[in-house]
Image (spheres, grey):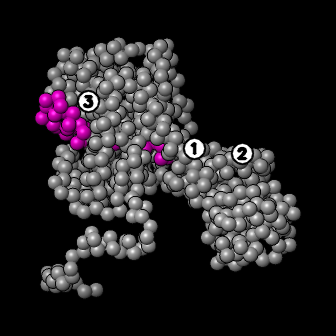
């Protein structure tokens, strides 16, 4: 191998200078040649908010200055602590801190992110969970509490005092968020006029004890988990943050001090560029809020958590890849702290391996990929700058609409926010059903023979009810995108358990492997995403042999698979043979084209193709096999 020297580099640069610089017009001519008259707009993507994503961007001019985590300062590696047994939770916390975590996310039962588990919110449990944890030694502590577990924040503060620790030396984010809780629950026992004094009283009390905060969180997960868009998430965070600032100012806290009492939390998902742009956009937007308050902007503390809605129960190891992309994006976007949800969380309480993988996701990205070495590495990127600017403009417009409605709580009471989220969620669910939005292992490339994944056996903490819901409005419950397909897989598992075999579909492959492999592969993935096992074949040219093989398979359903050319000559005869052999329902992989009427007359009932409503087809297939 030729060594790289200064002389060789100079020679390479000289050779490069001999070529004319490529321009956008040069690229556009090449693209137009490939498009062959098709509109260029086909290459322009759109986000859930309708924001445009062009296929290529020039270097950004006058790039935005995003003040956030400084260069070479790593984000806090937060590890989720949510075991209902306090002793087990303490063992997890100590192990995590000994093995690379630099912070703990204490998730209490009833919190928005608890997902069925969580710590007991009692003084005794807090004492056990924090035993041996040196929380005054620059360890980040973040609390996730709900209305029923809100006293956990006070118990943590009292624990610090009881141990004789200096509150100002503790890096604790108390996570108070009554607006977020009301949004998820869809109700509240109290009006905002009653909630505001309660939350500001708690904040002022904690501050008086000497804690530096921040204390209240504007939590964007509320919107993201419910299926909302990036713009909706950003606008909700702004509106919630401003609501807490207003409440604190109304309680006599100077805005200069109040802003340090509030922080933000965003979801990070596997859409790399959109996530990165969203984190950058939040900092720009919050700086605008501070300017409107007459303050000189200072960096907002932004915590990140990998997205709940992208987790799958099926093929959960792919969740590790999604979490890696999400962590990468949040880290480059300037997150100050990141919590990675373990890859098995959607199945139950994660075991030590899942927890280790979550922790090491961050360690590898920080210590081996050195992601924290550069401050705001996306600055100047045409694509990221453009996307961040579009997010800022759209989110600011929605924030203003929420403010005109009376603020975050009033907008929830009027279901202004919920209606927008519901509309976005509906489109997202339709895209999932049509597999336009792909979740590998769940909605695409399923594995019906995947091994069982272990989770811990733990009994969740039971909490007493929290007051009478006097104020009711539409709720924003969390969802997972893969859930509808997973319900079908669960149904398949139950049928296999009861009857010894899953529902099956016979792949009636026509011609040679070169003819049918592409569509047979598509059909196998299509039906097995719903738990209907594809019974593959070697290919047929003889209709009688096809009919006999189908009858021998014991399947009720069949799917013709081949090329358009073979369909033209064999599909009609093959469909008749399958119908004569007793096929209850016959599918054809591909669009019917001009042959549709003839194929239907021959017995083809349905056509399956990319972009079709796979979920509806699969649900109907179960009805046909009953």
**Where does the image place residue 623, in percent across and percent down from the top left?**
75, 46
Category of crowding for the residue at label 3, using alpha-carbon neighbours closer than 10 angstroms: few (below 14), some (14–19), many (at least 20): many
In the depicted view, which residue is nearer to us: 111 or 105? Answer: 111
Q: Position of residue 432 (x, y in %)?
A: 54, 49
- Relative placement, left or right, of 479 versus 391 is right
Front residue of this view, candidates 403 and 6: 403
Labelled disc at residue 494: 2
Gap in angstroms between the C-alphas marked 3 and 1: 34 Å
Residue with the most extreme bottom position = 2
Vertically, is 269 above or below 463?
below
Disc 3, SS: strand
Q: Residue at x 39, y 47 (%)?
A: 50
- Locate residue 293, reporting x and y percent: 17, 28
In this view, 67 is above or below 205: below
Q: Nearer the viewer, residue 370 or 540?
A: 540
Label 2 packing within 10 angstroms: few (<14), some (14-19), many (20+): some
> SS for tag 2?
helix
Which residue carries the number 1 mark?
Answer: 483
Left or right, 420 with respect to 555, comes to: left
Percent from the top left, x then y, of residue 366?
29, 54
């Amino acid at each position: 191998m030729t060594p790289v020297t200064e002389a060789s580099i100079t020679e390479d640069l000289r050779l490069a200078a001999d070529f004319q610089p490529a321009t956008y017009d040069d690229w556009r001519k090449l693209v137009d040649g490939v498009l062959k008259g098709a509109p260029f707009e086909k290459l322009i993507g759109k986000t859930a908010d309708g924001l445009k994503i062009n296929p290529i961007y020039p270097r950004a001019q006058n790039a935005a200055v995003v003040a956030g985590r400084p260069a070479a300062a790593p984000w806090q590696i937060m590890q989720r602590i949510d075991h209902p047994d306090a002793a087990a939770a303490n063992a997890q916390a100590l192990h995590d801190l000994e093995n690379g975590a630099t912070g703990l996310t204490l998730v209490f039962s009833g919190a928005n992110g608890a997902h069925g588990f969580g710590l007991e919110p009692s003084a005794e449990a807090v004492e056990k969970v924090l035993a041996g944890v040196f929380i005054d030694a620059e360890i980040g502590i973040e609390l996730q509490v709900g209305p029923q577990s809100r006293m956990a924040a006070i118990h943590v503060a009292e624990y610090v005092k009881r141990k004789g620790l200096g509150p100002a030396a503790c890096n604790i984010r108390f996570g108070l968020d009554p607006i977020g809780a009301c949004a998820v629950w869809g109700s509240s026992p109290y009006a905002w006029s009653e909630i505001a004094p309660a939350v500001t009283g708690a904040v002022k009390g904690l501050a008086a004890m000497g804690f530096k905060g921040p204390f209240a969180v504007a939590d964007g997960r509320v919107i993201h988990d419910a299926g909302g868009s990036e713009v909706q998430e950003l606008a909700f965070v702004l509106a919630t943050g401003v609501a807490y600032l207003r409440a604190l100012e109304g309680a006599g806290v100077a805005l200069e001090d109040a802003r340090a009492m509030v922080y933000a939390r965003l979801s990070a998902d596997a859409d790399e560029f959109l996530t990165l742009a969203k984190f950058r956009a939040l900092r720009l937007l919050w700086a605008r809020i501070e300017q409107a308050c007459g303050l000189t902007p200072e960096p907002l503390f932004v915590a990140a958590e990998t997205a709940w809605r992208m987790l799958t129960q099926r093929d959960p190891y792919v969740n590790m890849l999604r979490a890696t992309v999400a962590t990468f994006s949040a880290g480059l976007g300037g997150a100050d702290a990141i919590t990675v949800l373990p890859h098995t969380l959607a199945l139950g309480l994660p075991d030590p391996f899942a927890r280790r993988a979550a922790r090491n996701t961050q360690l590898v990205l920080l210590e081996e990929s050195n992601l924290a070495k550069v401050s705001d590495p996306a600055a100047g990127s045409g694509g990221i700058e453009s996307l961040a600017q579009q997010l800022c403009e759209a989110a600011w417009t929605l924030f203003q609409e929420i403010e005109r409605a009376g603020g975050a709580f009033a907008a929830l009471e009027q279901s202004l926010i919920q209606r927008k989220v519901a509309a976005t969620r509906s489109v997202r669910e339709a895209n999932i059903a049509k597999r336009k939005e792909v979740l590998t292992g769940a909605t695409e490339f399923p594995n019906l023979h995947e091994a069982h994944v272990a989770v811990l056996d733990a009994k969740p903490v039971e909490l007493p009810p929290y007051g009478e819901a006097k104020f009711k409005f539409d709720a924003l419950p969390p969802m997972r995108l893969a859930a509808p397909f997973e319900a079908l897989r669960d149904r398949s598992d139950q049928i296999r358990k009861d009857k010894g075999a899953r529902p099956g579909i016979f792949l009636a492959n026509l011609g040679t492997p070169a003819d049918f492999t592409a569509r047979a592969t598509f059909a196998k993935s299509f039906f097995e995403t719903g738990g209907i096992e594809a019974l593959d074949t070697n290919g047929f040219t003889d209709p009688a042999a096809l009919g006999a093989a189908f009858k021998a398979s014991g399947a009720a359903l069949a799917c013709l698979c081949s090329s358009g050319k073979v369909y033209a000559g064999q599909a009609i005869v093959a469909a008749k043979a399958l119908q004569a052999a007793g096929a209850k329902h016959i599918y054809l992989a591909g669009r019917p084209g001009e042959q549709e009427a003839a194929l239907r007359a021959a017995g083809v009932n349905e056509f399956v193709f990319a972009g079709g409503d796979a979920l509806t087809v699969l649900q109907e297939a179960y009805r046909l096999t009953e």
